[in-house]
Amino acid sequence: MRFQTPINESIFVSKIVPERSYMFDKELKTGLSIIWNTGKEARFMIDDEIITIQKDCVIFLTEYYQIDDFQFEEMNIIQFNRPFHCVDEHNDELGCKGLLFFGGAHVPKIIIPKERRRHFELLWEVFLIEIDEIDGFKLEMLRNLLKRFLILCLRIYKKQNHNLPADNINVGLIREFNYLVEQNFKQLTKVSDYAKLLFKSPKTLSNIFKKYIDKTPLQIINDRRLLEAKRQLKYTDNAIQEIAFDLNFRDVTSFSHFFSVRTGGSPSKFRNSLIS
């Protein structure tokens, strides 16, 4: 069930089963998605990585993830766009730059504790009731329910990820950097580019990342460029030269060197391996 306003604020709330898996090819390719596995163990192939999702596991996806394959029994889905809740200036832990969506290098996930499951079930029931309502309070009610759902998830995420640093200023900076990379990785390829946007020096950024996470700012930029290169090689017919220029490499040689160093093979070899 989907609710959409005249100014394109949109939220989708529904239980899905394998017969409705076409949604992964359409609805879940835009906006932000919360996937709560309510059935037996599920398996997803997300950006060439197998993600196992046990019952009562919740994962959080953006439109930037590529879901290639999936096996599941039943799941609850909440999908919403940024105009509905996650506008760019909403920069706290519940926003689109928050821990649940742009907070780390891997797909964020939580396991709902048994003692909390009823809380989630009740909230889900109210969600389904409200999305069927037709009155002037519907938008505000759905926004409040979504925020409550995210708060419940965030509380669990913090408890289940004990290595999260307590320094909110620097954690926020890392989240902001991750978000900026997602938005600009094709055009901005140097750490200094992002340092300017964040009003920090490249050295300050590097020191903060070294203190809190196991990747440098440059690794995050290059990992995102590599992921996009793999996606285009796999899902498009774009020539290698086109991909190189799209990702802001000066020529095919520099792109091939970049790709080979990180994968052990050339772009053409990677593409051919997908065919065979």
Image (cartoon, grey):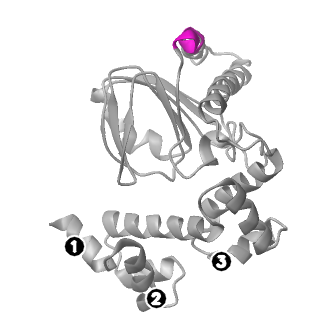
Label 2 environment density (alpha carbons within 10 Å; few <14, some 14–19, many ≥20): few
Give me the residue at 65% from left, 57% from top.
178
Residue 134 against residue 82 in the figure, above or below? above
Mark 1 — residue? 272
Q: Which mark is residue 113?
A: none
Mark 3 — residue? 190
Q: Which residues are magenta?
A: 114-120
Considering the numbered disc 3 on the image, is that residue within a helix, a strand or a loop?
loop
The percent position of residue 149, horizontal first and vertical second, equals 64, 23
The kind of residue tagged 3 is: Lys
The kind of residue tagged 2 is: Ser
What's the distance in space between the residues labelled 3 and 1, CA to CA? Answer: 30 Å
Camera-nearest residue between 215 and 267: 215
In the rendered image, residue 76 lying in the magenta stretch gets the answer: no
Camera-nearest residue between 72 and 109: 109
Q: Which mark is residue 254?
A: 2
Give me the residue at 81% from left, 73% from top.
201
The percent position of residue 153, horizontal first and vertical second, equals 62, 27
